[in-house]
Amino acid sequence: MLEGDIPSAMNPPSGCPFQTRCRWKSEVPGGLCEREVPPVRHLAEGHQVKCHLADDILARMEPVIKIAAE
Ligand code: SF4
């Protein structure tokens, strides 16, 4: 379950759009989540993420949303 403030669609936060609600933000060094929108990264097995977290942290997570391939 996500916690924290829901970002305003009219005035979105800088950087990652999830940064006001993300419990993992502190794992990303240098305040990158607050400064830069994460790029799309392609992981194993056709998975894609938009996140600044390191590969080893992402590898330990279960997906929140799964989109079935057509
Ligand atoms: S980039 Fe990743 S770690 Fe950073 S706020 Fe967004 S979802 Fe969280």
Image: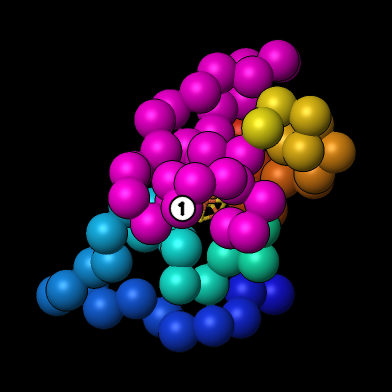
| Image side of residue 64 versus residue 7, left or right | right
| Image side of residue 68 versus residue 10, left or right | right
Residue type highlighted by circle 1 = Gly
How far across and how far down the image is residue 17, in percent? 36, 59
Examine the rendering and report whether any part of residue 69 can be seen.
Answer: no
At 32% from the left and 50% from the top, the residue drawn is 35
| Image side of residue 54 versus residue 61, left or right | left
Residue furthest front as drawn:
30
Q: Quadrant of the C terminus?
A: top right
Residue furthest right as drawn:
60
Q: Is residue 12 above or below residue 26?
A: below
The answer to whether residue 44 is magenta is yes
**Residues packed near mark 1 inside 10 Å, few (<14), some (14 to 19) or many (20 plus):** few
Q: Is residue 9 above or below residue 40?
A: below
How far across and how far down the image is residue 12, in percent? 23, 68
Residue assigned mark 1:
31
Q: Which residues are magenta?
A: 25-53
Q: Which coloring applies here? A: rainbow
| Image side of residue 30 versus residue 62, left or right | left
Q: Is residue 62 above or below residue 4?
A: above
How far across and how far down the image is residue 40, in percent? 43, 27
Q: Quadrant of the N terminus?
A: bottom right
The quadrant holding residue 6 is: bottom left
The answer to whether residue 56 is magenta is no
Q: Nearer the viewer, residue 7 or 27?
A: 27
At 14% from the left and 75% from the top, the residue drawn is 10
Q: Is residue 31 above or below residue 21?
A: above
Examine the rendering and report whether any part of residue 68 can be seen.
Answer: yes
At 66% from the left and 32% from the top, the residue drawn is 54
Q: Element at badge 1?
A: helix
How far across and how far down the image is residue 14, in percent? 27, 59
At 28% from the left and 66% from the top, the residue drawn is 13
